[in-house]
Amino acid sequence: MFRRREPVPFAFLAEADKFRSNVTPPPRERASVSQIAGRWLLGLTIVAALVGSLVVGMPALSPDQSTQTQQSQASQGH
């Protein structure tokens, strides 16, 4: 009926899963309006920074037009 567990060197660890507390934790405090606004502002700042870095970095990711022209002229034998 009950499975036997391996011996644990500390007795309180073996008994920990059997212990149930009857004390309920206090309810969480609700965030104030300024805290919610601050979280939204922080989130928008992070998103704007990511979008801005992508916009600034896009020219570096696109292939350069001058190198394609030079390569095509070299391949034609000019």
Image: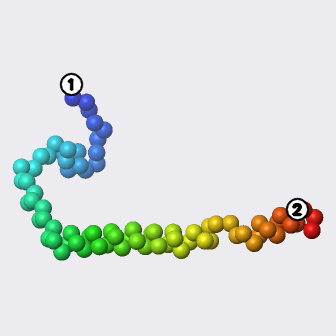
User: Is disc 1 in contact with disc 2, using a CB cutoff of under 8 Å?
Assistant: no
The C terminus lies in quadrant: bottom right
Report crowding for label 1: few under 14, some 14 to 19, many 20 or more residues within 10 A (C-alpha).
Answer: few
Q: Residue at x 33, y 69 (%)?
A: 43
Left or right of 31: which side holds 59? right
Q: Residue at x 12, y 65 (%)?
A: 29
Q: Residue at x 77, y 66 (%)?
A: 68
Q: Spatial distance from mark 1 to mark 2, Cα to Cα?
A: 81 Å
Task: Name the element at disc 2.
Answer: helix
At label 1, the amino acid type is Met
Residue indicated by mark 1: 1
Name the spot of residue 51 as percent of width and height, x first: 45, 69
To which quarter of the image does residue 1 belong? top left
Residue 51 seen in the current view: yes
Task: Name the element at disc 1.
Answer: loop
Q: Earlier in the sequence, mark 1 or mark 2?
A: 1
Farthest residue in the top direction?
1
Q: Residue at x 72, y 69 (%)?
A: 65
Left or right of 8: which side holds 59? right
Name the spot of residue 62 as percent of width and height, x first: 64, 66
Residue indicated by mark 2: 75
At label 2, the amino acid type is Ser
Report crowding for label 2: few under 14, some 14 to 19, many 20 or more residues within 10 A (C-alpha).
Answer: few
Q: Is residue 15 above or below residue 62?
A: above
- In front of the other: 62 or 78: 78
Left or right of 27: which side holds 6? right
